[in-house]
Amino acid sequence: MASSSSSSSALYRISNLQNHISPLEATNKLRSLVKISPQVSEALSNGRAVVALESTIISHGMPYPQNLQTAKEVESIVRENGAVPATIAILNGVPCIGLNEEELERLASLGKSVQKTAGRDIAYVVATRGNGATTVSATLFFASMVGIQVFVTGGIGGVHRHANQTMDISSDLTALGRTPIAVISAGVKSILDIPKTLEYLETQEVYVAAYKSDEFPAFFTEKSGCKPPSRVDSPEDYANKKLNRQAGILFAVPIPKQHSAAGNLIESATQRALTEAREQNVTGNAETPFLLARVNELTGGTSLAANCGSPFSANVSYLINLKLKLDSGLLKNIFLTTMAAFTVDFQLCFIAILVWLFSCFCLSAFFFKKRKEPELQDCNLPPSPPSVPVIGHLHLLLSVPVHKSFQKLSSKYGPLLYLRALTSPTVLATKNEAVDVGKEMINVTNNTICRMIMGRKCSEENGEAEQLRDLLTKSLSLVRKFLIASTVGPLLKKLGISLFEKEIMEVSQKYDELLEKIIKEREDNPNKKVDRYLIDVLLEGCADDNAEFEISRNQIKALLVELFLGGIETSGQTTSWIMAELINHPEMLKRLREEIISVVGKTKLIQETDRSNLPYLQAVVKELHPHSPIVVRNATEGCKIGGFYIPQNTTMIINTYAVMRDPDSWEEPDEFQPERFMVPPSKGNKEMREQLDLNYIPFGGGRRGCPGSNLGSIFVGLAIGTMVHCFDWSIDGEKVNMEEAGDVNLSMAHPL
Ligand code: HEM
C-alpha cells in the first residue's frame, strides 16, 4: 500500500536512489511504496485475470483529451473480456498499479510533462517524487513485482538499424529476457532492424510466437519478411507455452485486416523515408528522428490515426488498434511541456531542507539571543498578514499557484504587503507600477529565434531541437527555484547550503555542449563574411582585440541562452492563450478575420508592414495572459514606496498577474476584451492611454524589463493573424478549457 510517513521525506526518497545499485533490494523497498488499486488487488488475491497496461502511450502518444478517451476505451475492452485492467504509472513518486478515473485523467492531462520512465529511471522518479509514465520495461518491472502475468502493449522497442555503431538497443528486450510475463504486442516497427531484434530476443531467451501467422508482424503490416521462431493459433496454445521460466514470452499479433490499408500506407511512407535517409546519408542517432518526422509528413499524422480509430474488437486484436491509433498520434510530434512535475520535485526537496532548518532555528532560538533591528522598529512597514513562528510567511511563498494566493492576500491587505521568509524580508507590490512596455506579444518559435541568431534552425532530424526544448523546460523549472532561492538563498548560503548547484551545473554543461557545437559550425562556415547573423557579429567581436565591444566566448553563450529562454517559451505560451481566447469568442475571431481580409485580401499572406493597418489585431495580441505572473526585484538600498518604508536588501515580488486583473484598474478584468485597448489616439484620451500603459505590465518594466517585447510584437501579430486568416478553427466540446497550470509560468493546464 501507500508509502509510510517517513517515505514522504525527500531525503528518504533520495536515499532510495542507492537501490539502483542493488536491484533486489530496490524491488523489495519499492514493493512497500507501491499502491495497488482495490480492483487489481482483489483480482490478484482471488486469482482473476489482470492485464497490465503501460502509460507512456497515454502521456506521450496522443494529445489530451484524445489520450484519455483511448485509455478508457482500452480499459473497458479489457473489462469486457473478463479481465481487470491495471494501467501502471508513477504519480507523485508512488508507483500505482491500476489507476482510478481521477488518476487516469491527471496522467492524461499532464501529457508530456510526465517523465517517460524506463526501467532504469524508476528509482529516480520515485526518489524525486515525480510523475512517471511507464514504458514497456518499467511496466514489466512493476507488473511482475505484484504478480501480474499478462501485459498488453502497442509495440515493443527493438534493435536500431545502426546498432552496430550506436549500440542503440531498447531496454524492453533485456527486460523481457528477465521478466516472466506474457507480452502481447503488434510486433516491431520496420524502422527498427527486425531480424536483429529477433536475434537479440533469442539471446535473451525470450520465447517469441506470432499469433495465427507464419510471419513476424511489423507493427503496421501483417508481414515483415521475417519468420517467427513459432506460431500460436489459440489461447489454449498460449496456455501451453506458459512454462515456469524466468524469461518473458512475446506474442506478436498482426494488424487486423480492417486496418491493414491504413497500416500499409504508413509502412510505404516508412519505406520511402528509409530510402531518403540512405540517399541523404542520414545515419546513426539522426536516423530515427529523421524517419519519424518524415513518416509524419508523408502520412499527415493524425488524419491517418482517425481512420484507424474504429471500434476495438473483442479479442487481443484491440491492442493493434490501440497501437495504430497511439503511434500515429506519436508521429504527430507534439511537444507539450509544463513544469508541474518539477514543481512537485522541488517542493519535496525544499520541505526536507525546511525540516532541517526548523530544527536549527528552534535550537538557535533557544540558545542565542535574537538580534535586534532597531532601525526598522520605528519604520512604517507595509501591512503584513499573520505569520508562522520561525518560518514567517514562507508557506505563502511556496503556495501553488503563487500569483493567485498573492492576489487573494492583496485584495485583503492592500497593494503592498510585507512578507518574511525565515528572516529575509520580502515586499509584494501589486499595483500600478510605472512601466514602459506594452507592445503586443508575438509567437517567436524556436526556429524563428534560432534563425535570427544563427541563420539556421535547431534541427529536428539530428535531435538538436528536442535537446533545446528539453533544456528550456529544465531551465524554466529552475526559475521557480530561483525565485524562492532569492528570498532564502543568502541565508542558506551562510549555513553552507548551496541550492540546486548540481542541477544548474548539469543544465549549463548541456547548454555549453550544444552552443559550442553551433559556434564551431559558424566559425567553420566559409560564407560567414557575407551570410552574417547575430552570432557572427558577436564572434567577430570576441576575436578582435580592437572591437567596439568586448565579449568573451562564455558571455556569448550566456547571451544566447538568455535569448532562447526569454523568447521561445514566452511567445509560444502567449500565442496559445490568445488563440484559445479567440476560439472561445467566435464573434471576435470573425471580426479579426474580416479586418485582415479587408486589408490583406484573400489571396496574399499577412506581412509585417500590414500590422499598422490592423488595429484590432494589435488589440487582440495586447489582451494577453501575462506569461510571467510574477517578476522579482531587490531593493539595493532602503526606499519608500507608496508611503511605506522598504528596508535595504528586501526582495520585492511584483505580481503582474494581479495588476493585470485589478478591478480598480480594469473593467471586467477577467473577461477577454481586446476593445479595451482600442482607445483612439485623440488628445482627450491621453490620460486614459497613459493609465492603460501604467497598468499594462506583462513584459515587466524598467531597466530589467523585457528587451524582446518589441521584436516579439511583430512576429506574434503575424502568427495570430496568419492562423486566423488562413484556417478555420473548431474544437471538441463547446469551449477551450482555460484552466491555468499552477506554476511560475502561466501555461495552460490543458494545452490547446
Ligand atoms: C510574448 C512574448 C514575451 C513575453 C510575454 C515576455 C515577458 C518577459 C518578462 C515578464 C520579463 C521579465 C521582465 C522584468 O523582470 O521586468 C522578460 C525578460 C526578458 N525577455 Fe522577454 N518576453 C517575451 C518575448 C521575448 C523575446 C522575443 C525575447 C528575445 C528574443 C525576450 C528576451 C528577454 C530577455 C533577454 C529578458 C531578460 C531581461 C533582463 O533580465 O534584463 N523576450 N520577458
Image (tube, rainbow, N blue to C red):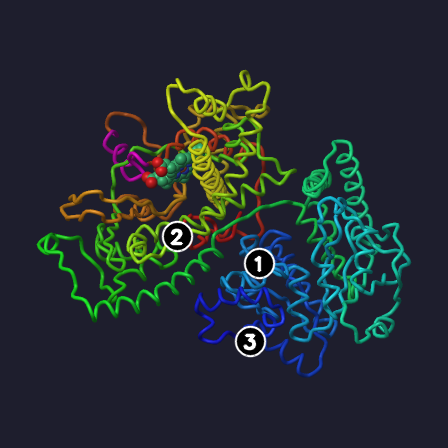
Seen at 45% across and 52% down, the residue is 502
- Please, what is the three-letter code of the amino acid marked with disc 1? Ala
Give the Cα separation between the discs numbered 3 and 2.
Answer: 31 Å
Q: How many marks?
A: 3
- Please, what is the three-letter code of the amino acid marked with disc 2? Lys
- Please, what is the three-letter code of the amino acid marked with disc 3? Ser
Q: Quadrant of residue 392?
A: bottom left
Q: Dot 3: what SS? A: helix
Quadrant in which the N terminus is drawn:
bottom right
- Residue 224 position, x and y percent, is 85, 50
Asked if one can make out residue 699 in the rendered structure from this viewpoint, the answer is no
Circle 3 packing at 10 Å, graded few (<14), some (14-19), many (20+), is some
Residue named by callout 3: 32
- Residue 602 position, x and y percent, is 57, 26
Whether the residue carrying mark 1 lies under 8 Å from ligand 1 is answered with no
Give the Cα separation between the discs numbered 1 and 2.
Answer: 26 Å
Give the Cα separation between the discs numbered 1 and 3.
Answer: 26 Å
**Looking at this view, is 234 or 452 the one in front?**
452
Above or below, 621 relative to 662: above
**Looking at this view, is 61 or 550 the one in front?**
550
Q: Which mark is residue 481?
A: 2
The nearer-to-camera label among 1 and 3 is 3
- Specify which label sits upstream in the sequence, 1 or 3: 3
Above or below, 199 relative to 207: above
Residue named by callout 1: 108
Identify the magenta region.
685-704
As for residue 505 lying within the magenta part, the answer is no
Asked if one can make out residue 272 in the rendered structure from this viewpoint, the answer is yes
Q: Quadrant of residue 27?
A: bottom right
